[in-house]
Each structure stands twice: as C-alpha cells, then as structure tokens.
Amino acid sequence: MGTLLRRSLAVAASAGLLLGSSALADTIHMKNGSSIECTVERETYEKVYYKLSNLNVTDLQNQNLADVEKIDYARIPETYQEGRKLQSEGSFGDAIDAYKEYVGKGKDEPFVQYALYYIAQCYQSAGKYKEAIDAYDDLLKQVPKTRFYPQAYLAKANCYQVLGDAASAKKQYQQLKSDASKFGPRWEAEANFYLTVLDESKDYEAAIKKYREMMATRQDEGVAQKAELQIGLVLVAQNKLDEALEHFRKITEREGASASILAGAWVGMARCYLEKPKASEQDYKEARFAALRTVILYPEATEYLPAALYYAGRAFELVHDTNWRGRAKQLYDRVMSDFPASEWAAKAKERAR
C-alpha cells in the first residue's frame, strides 16, 4: 500500500468515515451502569435529548438528567476546549475570551450553555463577583431550562453573600429551595445549609444544632461535609480557638473529605494559629504550613485560596525568617492580582504598604 493511500485511510478513519457512526458517537453513561451511544442534541435540568447512532432510528430520544452519571462528547469544539484548558490553569481572563469567542459562533448547542456557565465561574473564581452575577443571569436568560439552573442560583447567592448583600443572597437561596423539587434533594439541602449560614450569628448554638442534624441525616454528602466545616467556623466566631483547631484537624485526618473541604479546614487551622491570644513563633510556623498546604495542594479551591494566600503572608511576616518580607509581599501581590474584588485583597493591600 502506498504512502499516500495509507495517509488518506488514516485521515478517513480519524474522521469516522471507515469506523461507522459509533466512532464519533457521544456516550451517555447512566447511573445504573448502562451506556447509550448517540448524538446528544441538548440538555436541560430535566432531560438529556439525543438521537441514536443507529441510522434507522431518527426520532429524538430522552433520558432523565437525574439518572445520568456523565456524558462523554465525541466532538469537542476547539475554541471551547481551549477555554477549558485556560480555566484549569487559572488563566480566567483568557478563558473568558475563549468561551465568548465560542458562544459568539452560535453553534453546537450542547456546549453553548457549558461555555456560558464557565464564563460565570471564571468571573467568580477571579473574585469579580458582580460580573459573575451578570454572567449567571445571562446563562439563565439565554438557556432558561439550562442543566446548570440550580448551580447558577446557588452561585449567584454565594456571590451576593461575599459582596455583603445578605438580602439578595437570601432571595436566591429561597428561590432555589422553592424550585428544589425539580432538581432533587441535594439542592434543597444546599439551600437549607446556606440559609442557616446567613442567620447563624443570631444564635450560634442553634446553628450548630442544625449543622449537626445535616451531618446526621446526610440528605446530601457534600452538604454534610460543609456543615461539619461550618461548625469549626462557628467555633472560631465564638472565639473557641482551641476547640475549633481540634475540630479542623479532625476533618483533615478523616478519609473521604473533598478537596474543597480539606482546603477550608487547613485555612481554618491557619486562622486559629494566627489568632491565638498568646501565639508563639511555633504557632506562626504551623499557620504558615497550614496556609501554604492549601495554596499548593488545593489551588482549585478558589473559595478558600485568597484567605490561604493572605494567612500565609501574615505568617511569613510574623516568623521573620530568611527573606520573610519578600515572600510575604509575593503572596499579598498574588491575592491582589488574582482576587482583586475580595476582602482579602483589601487586607493584603493594607499589609503590603
């Protein structure tokens, strides 16, 4: 066989021309272990709509989204894929540009809502919370039944909460709670958790009781872990630092905790060490270790990363070892550049003077 013919066959095979329709089929993986070879047409918060790869079946089929484990797409648009790569690297501005370029082309509907959602996520991860809220609203406007409907409401509420707008945050959580029957028990549990966080300062002991109930019932595993972490934060708010420190330490030692929860626990430990009334140099070193552990091991946990960077900077200042001032400044500069709208950027700016 000639070289030219071999190359032509290779190109044809890579395009799916010789391997049959299944070569370029999307795959829907179901929670019951089965899978479906197909072409996905669109996804909503209720259903996944698709056409079977069998050319004799042309009718649009569907599966309940709640029964779907994941979807593997055979063809991923190049610009969209570039956005995902940039986002994973923390280049949020460039990722947003890539996603917007892709959305502007107006093709491949299954991916448009993903791109719109990730645009909002990038703004949120970069600490641009007002822009994130606008981007989530844009998603909900352009794709009213988006599969990311509950995630968008939850994220909007989180953004309002960070911005100190408790009333708007509460409105979003309540909306999510009222719509939760459409999406499954997880979202009611999420809404109840954050509504408790909003009101916890009114009665810390009552809040701890609710968090323990969430841990015991485990309506949702992720929410149960958040509730356990939040108990530690309530203990800090009550100035029970030794008790909080031990609580956070137990979380870091327990198997099964998510990366986000572990990041939150290590940041909580750093805060406890730094805020001890009679902190020693060893306490400051422990704080530095805990904060840097978050920065190095859990960079994707952007909810806690700016606090970790700030606490690491403070610890370097307080330890006063080799080149401590330069290292602290590097950490403060990163908080200000990567999370400019966060409370930690304001604190870092004050320390960097």
Image (cartoon, rainbow, N blue to C red):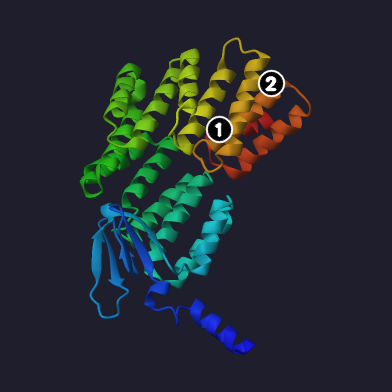
Residue sitting at x 55%, y 80%: 10
Q: Which of 171 and 313 is in front in this view?
A: 313
Corner quadrant of residue 185: top left
In the rendered image, the residue lying farthest to the top is 278
Q: Nearer the viewer, residue 55 or 284?
A: 55
Corner quadrant of residue 35: bottom left
Residue sitting at x 26%, y 48%: 183
Q: In this view, does 48 lie above or below 159?
A: below
In the rendered image, residue 6, in percent from the top left (x then y), is placed at: 58, 85
In the rendered image, residue 157, in percent from the top left (x then y), is placed at: 37, 41
Q: How many labels does the image show?
A: 2
Q: Would you say 275 lies left or right of 63 here? A: right
Q: Could you tell which of marks 1 and 2 lies nearer the N-terminus?
A: 1
Residue marked by disc 1: 307
Report how far apart the C-alphas of labels 1 and 2 lie in the structure: 16 Å
What amino acid is labelled 2 in the image?
Leu
In the rendered image, residue 72, in percent from the top left (x then y), is placed at: 40, 61
Q: Callout 1: helix, strand or loop?
A: helix
Crowding at mark 2 (Cα within 10 Å: few <14, some 14-19, many 20+): some
Crowding at mark 1 (Cα within 10 Å: few <14, some 14-19, many 20+): many
What amino acid is labelled 1 in the image?
Ala
Q: Is residue 254 above or below residue 131?
A: above
Q: Which of 110 and 309 is in front in this view?
A: 110
Q: Which of 20 and 277 is in front in this view?
A: 20
The answer to whether residue 96 of the structure is visible from this angle is no
Q: In which quarter of the image is the C terminus?
A: top right
Residue sitting at x 42%, y 73%: 24
Identify the mark at residue 318; answer none if there is no mark. 2
Identify the mark at residue 328; answer none if there is no mark. none
Q: Callout 2: helix, strand or loop?
A: helix
In the rendered image, residue 187, in percent from the top left (x then y), is placed at: 29, 42
